[in-house]
Amino acid sequence: MTTFDVLTDAQRADLRARLEERKEQLLQELGAVQQRTLDAAAATARGDAEPAGSPRDQANQMARTMVYEAEAGRDHAELVAVRAALERLGDGSYGECTDCGQPVGLARLQAQPQAARCIVCQTLAEQR
Ligand SMILES: [Zn+2]
């Protein structure tokens, strides 16, 4: 590993701050989704859910639910990645590819602080 590939303390602190901030954001978004789901479930349980609308309303409703679920899935996957990155910052392995051990690279980390793999391993993983 050359000195060029080693993150400075300042870079590390900056990336950690961004990861922490992103984690808070994701937790808030996921909390909002959860609340919406709970509200809907409570309304259904009370029997005063949505007054049965037109088929078009119902289709819109279903489409919205699917979008929420897709968003929640993405947020959740990102949260897992962000948490794992914070753990790697804690144990000192942050910035090394989790697959091959080579430096992930500063440019890649700055674009995506939660990146666990170098671009080569990431590309291979996405092809699997
Ligand atoms: Zn790699």
Image: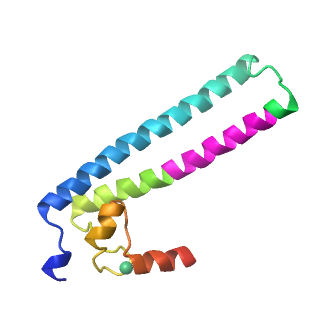
Q: Quadrant of residue 107?
A: bottom left
The image quadrant where one finds ligand 1 is bottom left
Q: Position of residue 16 (x, y in %)?
A: 24, 53
Magenta span: predominant SS is: helix
Q: Position of residue 113 (x, y in %)?
A: 33, 60
Whether 117 is drawn above or below 113: the answer is below
Q: Nearer the viewer, residue 92 or 11?
A: 11
Examine the rendering and report whether any part of residue 34 can be seen. yes
- Quadrant location of the C terminus? bottom right
Q: Position of residue 45 (x, y in %)?
A: 71, 21
Examine the rendering and report whether any part of residue 128 can be seen. no
Q: Is residue 83 left or right of residue 31?
A: left
Is residue 14 within the magenta segment? no
**Residue range (magenta):** 58-75
Whether 66 is drawn above or below 101: the answer is above
Q: Nearer the viewer, residue 102 or 44?
A: 102
Q: Is residue 122 left or right of residue 52?
A: left
Number of callouts: 0
Q: Position of residue 84 (x, y in %)?
A: 36, 58
Q: Residue at x 48, y 35 (%)?
A: 31
Is residue 60 within the magenta segment? yes
Q: Residue at x 20, y 76 (%)?
A: 5
Q: How is the image coloured?
A: rainbow
